[in-house]
Image (spheres, rainbow, N blue to C red):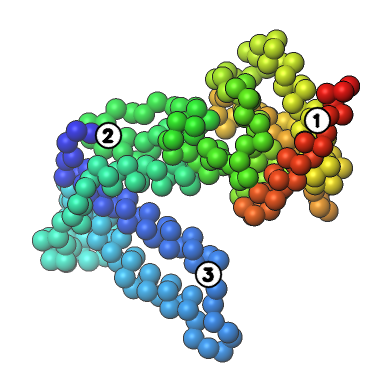
Amino acid sequence: MPAHFTESDLARLALSARLRDLSEELREAVAAPDGPAGSGSALAERLWQLLDDDVPALRDALVGYLRARDTPWSWIGERTGTGETGARARWGTAGPAPLDDPRATAAALDAWYVRHAQVEPLAQVADPVSRLLGGSEPGQERCLICAKYAGEPVPAWAGRPVPPGGHLVDDGTWRVGHGPTGFWPRGTLLIESRRHFLDHSDISPDEAVSLGLLVRRLTGAIKEATGAPRVHVWSCMEGTPHFHTWLVPRVGEVDSGRAFIGAPGHCTEAQATQSVQAIREALQGREPREDAA
């Protein structure tokens, strides 16, 4: 984060904030309910409002940003179809929208982008927006699992510090909780190492033994709780360089094997919480039998 914000920085933040707000409006419109057929359309009214108000405001913010970067009026006039004279007349006295707290705006934009990021390079950094501002040092790639438990913003697919239904296991070596609901079916569990290391080549002998026993316990409990005929165990360490393993039940009428893992589905928060409770009960029912063995 820069110590001082230039005029170009402020204009970029104002533009980015407009883009974020419009993006959120459009995202919500995708699944917005509408009125009955033959009546006025609430969805259409909202979209027309976006076209009439928000899109022109976005264009104003873009022109403000371009002028802060000393873009010639002739170029702006050509791109907007107003001509140089028309562009000067329309935007010559306008400036970037004022920001009450540029630092807070930049931090909020960083957090918003990270939460919505998919598997892309910028998902690995904490400051995808503020790093673009003058005087900022480029952010370093980070471990999303370590960042998550440190309270930093992470992409939705990296999960939350407290997963739905709470952790099933948190024994000082491993954490086990339900996978992010928007990306995995009910009953999916994520095993994360407490210690930061990459893959099986870095695992200690004790960790290797405990992981094998843990996967065995969890697989049986998942099958019992979900009725899944198979539980797929896999990890590629591509999302973040920290050891983790997915246990994914093949529930419902779905394709098997590789086709299923490519598009495993999703679930609701309530379904995930219910599944965790069922798995927790299954684990409690299995422990005496396994201990006796």
Q: Is residue 204 above or below residue 24?
A: above
Q: How far is the residue under mark 1 from the one under mark 3?
A: 46 Å
**Mark 3 = which residue?**
32
Element on which disc 3 rests:
loop
Q: From the top left corner, tell me how far across and down residue 69 is, in percent.
A: 20, 45
- Which quarter shows the C terminus? top right
Task: Identify the disc placed on residue 1.
Answer: 2
Instruction: Point out the tag, 2 or 3, that comes first from the N-terminus.
Output: 2
Between discs 2 and 1, the one toward the N terminus: 2
Q: What percent of the width, then of the height, locates residue 78?
A: 25, 59
Where residue 7 appears, as percent x and y from the top left, is 16, 45
The kind of residue tagged 3 is Ala
- Name the residue at 62% across, 29% down: 170
The residue furthest left is 93
Q: CA gap, disc 2 to disc 3?
A: 36 Å
Classify 221 as above or below 202: below
Q: Amino acid at mark 2?
A: Met
Which residue: 80% across, 47% down?
Answer: 226
Which of the 4 image quarters holds residue 279?
A: top right
> What residue is shown with label 1?
287
SS category of the residue bearing label 2: loop
Q: Is residue 70 left or right of residue 104?
A: left
Instruction: Say if 62 sits above or below 211 in the image.
Output: below
The percent coordinates of residue 61 (x first, y second) are 25, 57
The answer to whether marks 2 and 3 mark residues whose Cβ atoms lie closer than 8 Å is no
Real-space CA distance between mark 2 and mark 1, rounded to the nearest whole angstrom: 50 Å
Circle nearer the N terminus (1, 3): 3
Q: Are marks 1 and 3 in contact (CB under 8 Å)?
A: no
